Amino acid sequence: MNGMLLDDHDVVLFDLDGTVYRGGELVPGALEAIQQVHGRGVPVRYVTNNASKPDQAVVDHLIGLGLKAERSEVSTSAQAGAAVLAEKLPAGSRVLVVGSAALESEVDRLGLVPVTEFADEPVAVVQGLSTELGYRDFAEACLAIRDGALWVACNADRTLPTERGLMPGNGALVELLRAATDQDPLVAGKPERPLLDRAVSSAGADRPLMVGDRLDTDIAGAVKAGMPSLMVLTGVNTPRHLLEAALGERPGSVAADLRGLFSPKSEVAIAAQPAWSVTVGDGLELASRGEGDELGALRALCAAWWSAGSGPVQVVGSDDAARAALRALDID
């Protein structure tokens, strides 16, 4: 493995919340890294499961944080959700919108008719995050879904990372309707393919790289789409989550933040590491055999455990350096 991770790819798909920013703050390293990607002439696409904002609002937010962005670079789960509906319904079909004005606008833009009440006889329900939703919205959707309406969820993220911490995401509200209807929605956003496929197609690319902080959406979506992925440790999921990741939620690389795009491929790849050895038995035993950082230890641990098992595992360090690395990773 020679060269930087970025060298192998003709578009980078960036998750936003927890990867590029947390609420109104850029995550460490994001500005420099994305500027460098642009500087090397590699297209970027911002793929967000947040369906509460129109694409222009996402652009404005990114520009306000100091980044360059254009509407063509933004793919939202609201767009993907509306596109799924448009593929399945004839033009003029009535769709009950449980979500923001941005989601309503996307439904209208694709020739469907947004409504807000069961009495309007909707043939489908589309659900996206909005902080203005109330009981009535879910009651109307519940009636429509129970009556046989097609149900599309823009995304299923149970939490949303902000500068204040994790907040309820659309997935938490999807669970409310799932419990009330005994039905499951079609999901347009990550980890399902519509959102990612749309982003790659818009760039005319065939060697994409997905970059994100969540195993169950960003990384699982990349796995389903058959594309490589880089996990960054700036958002929801932790080193412990990564080590215990299910088969369909495992990235090829992991880095502290977006600056990992410019690291040598061999340094960020989840693989055996020269500075660390891992013994697999009833658990994992980590030992130091040279100068190495804690992320190298994490990559070595993941490589060893993923080849032997999955799920929860106990990890111990056999020397001072190994124990220090495990404490830093919070997986001792």
Image: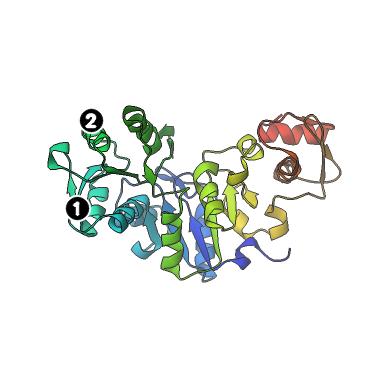
Establish if 219 lies above or below 326: below
Residue in view at x 84 percent, y 40 percent: 288
Is 280 on the left or on the right of 30, as rendered? right
Percent x, y for residue 272?
78, 49
Is 266 on the left or on the right of 12, as rendered? right
Q: CA distance from mark 2 to mark 1?
A: 21 Å
Answer whether residue 331 is visible to the viewer in this image: yes
Of badges 2 and 1, the one in the foreground is 1
Percent x, y for residue 15?
47, 51
Residue in view at x 32 percent, y 32 percent: 177
Of residues 203 and 149, the one nearer the viewer is 149
Q: Residue furthest front?
A: 148
Instruction: Identify the disc placed on residue 139.
Output: 2
Establish if 255 lies above or below 245: below
Rendered-image quadrant of the C terminus: top right
Q: Callout 1: few (<14), some (14-19), or many (20+) C-alpha neighbours within 10 Å?
A: some
Establish if 279 lies above or below 196: above
Residue in view at x 82 percent, y 47 percent: 275
Labels 2 and 1: the sequence-earlier one: 1
In the picture of the structure, the residue carrying the numbered disc 1 is 93
* Amino acid, disc 1: Ser
Rendered-image quadrant of the N terminus: bottom right
Residue in view at x 49 percent, y 58 percent: 13
* Amino acid, disc 2: Ala
Answer whether residue 133 is visible to the viewer in this image: no
